[in-house]
Every structure is written in C-alpha cells, then in structure tokens.
Image: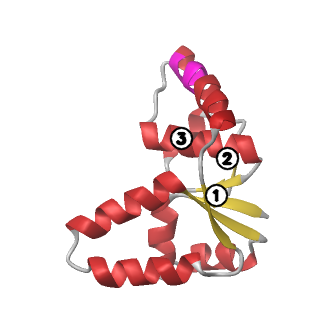
Amino acid sequence: MRIALDTNRYVDFCRGDPRTVEVLRTAEAILLPFVAMAELRAGFRIGSRGAENEKTLARFLNGPRVRVLYADEQTTHHYARLFFQLSTQGAPIPTNDLWIAALVAQHDLILFDRDRHFDHLPQLARC
C-alpha cells in the first residue's frame, strides 16, 4: 500500500495512535505531501517545542520508505479538475487539502487522513 500522509495523521503517529502506527508500519511507501510538511512546520513555529518537533520530522523523513511528494505541472491539471468538481457540488475544501487531493489523484495513492471534507471526493482511495 502506497499512502499519502495527511498532516493530522502524522500528528497521530507522533502521539502513538495505535491504528496510525500500524498503517504506517505496514505501508509499502509513505509519501508526505509538501503541503502537509509546510503545515507541520508552520505549527512547529507557533508551538513551544519547535526544535524538538523539527528533529522528529527529520528522523521521520529519513525513513527508508518515506519521501516528500512535490507538485509539478501535471498536478495543476488534477487540482483544476478537482476544484471544478467540488465547485459544481457546492462543497469546497481548504486549499491545502485540495493540493493534497490533487497529488493523491495524480500518483494513484491511498490518502491516510481523518478529514470529512475528503468525503466529497469519492474517487480518492482512503484508509
């Protein structure tokens, strides 16, 4: 299973959530969208444990099955298609999550999240 890890599930992993730990332990590949990494680092900046959290993230990113997933020109086509779909449905989602959804669609990944607004994109595989 190749998963795209949403920000909230990374936090769950760091907190030792058993289900999250198990999903990540058994995943073939763990892809952290650049947007999720940016959200994490923004949270580190406003928190009181920024340096510690940054070290934890660095260790996570150095894992053999982990890599950061970046957008490219093709991602913008997926973003536009999903944006149009959500607009037509009258169900917009936060911009950062739309970027994550576009990356998931582009790379045929399984999204590991706990955000209900992704329910408006039934074509995305989720766990």
Task: Examine the structure image and report whether residue 78 is included in the region drawn in magenta.
Answer: no
Secondary structure that dominates the magenta span: helix
Q: Amino acid at mark 1?
A: Ala
Q: 72 or 91: nearer the eye?
A: 72
Q: Which residues are magenta?
A: 83-87
- Residue 114 visible in image: no
Q: Earlier in the sequence, mark 2 or mark 1?
A: 1
* Circle number at residue 4: 1
* Circle number at residue 99: 3
Q: 89 or 83: nearer the eye?
A: 83
Disc 3 residue crowd, few under 14, some 14–19, many 20+, Cα 10 Å: many
Disc 1 residue crowd, few under 14, some 14–19, many 20+, Cα 10 Å: many
Determine whether label 2 and label 1 are within 8 Å by CB.
yes
Decide if residue 36 is on the left or right side of residue 48: right
Name the residue located 55 percent from the left edge and 25 percent from the top edge.
83
Residue occupied by mark 2: 104
Dot 1 falls on a residue whose secondary structure is strand
Q: How far apart are the two marked residues, 2 and 1, measured between alpha carbons?
A: 7 Å
Residue 43: percent from the left, percent from the top?
Answer: 30, 64
Residue 19: percent from the left, percent from the top?
Answer: 60, 74
Q: Amino acid at mark 3?
A: Trp
Q: Earlier in the sequence, mark 2 or mark 3?
A: 3
Q: Amino acid at mark 2?
A: Val
